[in-house]
Image (tube, grey):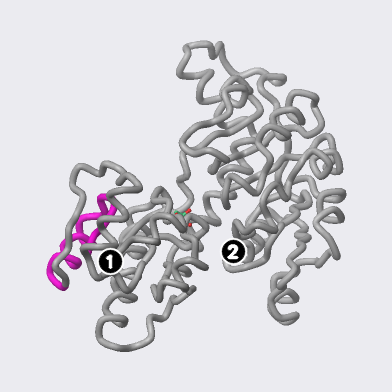
Amino acid sequence: MVVTRRLPAPVEEQLAREFDAQLNPADRPLSAEELTDALRGADALLPTVTDRLTAQVLAAEPLRARIIANYGVGFNHIDTTSAKARGLVVTNTPDVLTDDTADDALMLMLMVARRGGEGERHVRAGAWTGWRPTHMLGTRVSGKTLGLIGLGRIGRAVAHRARHGCGMRVLFHDPYPPPAAVVAELGAEPRGSVDDVLREADFVSLHSPATPETRHLIDARRLALMKRGAFLINNARGDIVDEAALVAALKQGTIAGAGLDVFEREPAVTPDLLTMENVVLLPHLGSATHETRTAMGLRALDNLRAFFTGAAPRDRVA
Ligand code: DGY
């Protein structure tokens, strides 16, 4: 098996115990050619979001691999249509990262509204002259209206935190909403369209998968529907937002700020964003805790173990 990136030690140890695993101690991303070679030479590939498994890579001949056990819940970096056509099983790692990713969305929301990043830079720069009533005032989060685009596992965990932790009103739009009882228990209010959520929310947080339908879902037109004082939060996938349109909206004051954990061309960040104080920029940290990154690895391992013992892997997505 080829493991494309360095993984937490307990996961690598377990993989090495159970499989003939080629690890990547240097943690250097594999090239397209190396990924193709891995599919030719190994029975399984354990990739991450930084590996682009395109139709071309998946056209590897002769193909030895039978399963791609992705380390991560999002799998938009894998051309699943091509994988299916090649008879490859694809799995992901849902559930185990839900809480940490929801915490990360809350962190972005609080940081951007309460000027956390800016304040930290201020103190580190030695610019702080002391407490004063008018210093670095931000926007209250508690009691405000949160609009969720997507009410899947992570969206629901954000809704729960926002409602019970910050007393927020929660609106959402999801073309495939959870059962009415789940929505009722969350106390979340459905809206018929993304646009309706954007018009009402003080904070808009994105929790949709990255698909052709959600690419640039948040574009110039939709940013213009948001309240002038509203904040956009994205820790789902970068290409759900048209980053150029977001930069323009921030420059024009169309919205108040943004908290971003993901970017359209990761790890590149549109340079203008780096200069904006009302933007919080994090390096794709959604699931980045010791606990979760280990759990993700063990979940990928469960999928591999099931597959190679002839059982159905629990997280099969293709
Ligand atoms: C996920 O699990 O989707 C993370 O964003 C890393 O891939």
Residue 177: numbered disc = none
Q: Residue at x 32, y 44 (%)?
A: 31
Q: Is mark 1 within 8 Å of ligand 1?
A: no
User: In which quadrant of the rendered view does residue 256 lie?
Assistant: top right
Residue 62 painted magenta = no
Q: Are marks 2 and 1 in contact (CB under 8 Å)?
A: no
Residue 4 painted magenta = yes
Q: Could you tell me which secondary element the residue under label 2 belongs to?
A: helix
Q: Residues within 10 Å of mark 1 (few under 14, many from 20)?
A: few
Q: Nearer the viewer, mark 2 or mark 1?
A: 1
**141 with respect to 239 (left or right):** right
Span of residues in magenta: 1-18
Which amino acid is tagged 2? Ala
Q: CA distance from mark 2 to mark 1?
A: 43 Å
Q: Residue at x 73, y 50 (%)?
A: 217
**222 with respect to 185 (left or right):** right
Q: Residues within 10 Å of mark 2 (few under 14, many from 20)?
A: some
Residue 62: numbered disc = 1
**14 with respect to 201 (left or right):** left
Q: Is residue 140 above or below residue 170?
A: above
Among numbered discs 2 and 1, the one appearing first in the sequence? 1
User: In which quadrant of the rendered view does residue 274 lie?
Assistant: top right
Residue that extends furthest to the bottom in the rendered view of this protein: 311
- For mark 2, what is the residue? 157
Which amino acid is tagged 1? Pro
User: In which quadrant of the rendered view does residue 93 lie?
Assistant: bottom left
Q: Could you tell me which secondary element the residue under label 1 belongs to?
A: loop
- Seen from the viewer's position, the closer of residues 299 and 70 is 70
- Seen from the viewer's position, the closer of residues 37 and 262 is 37
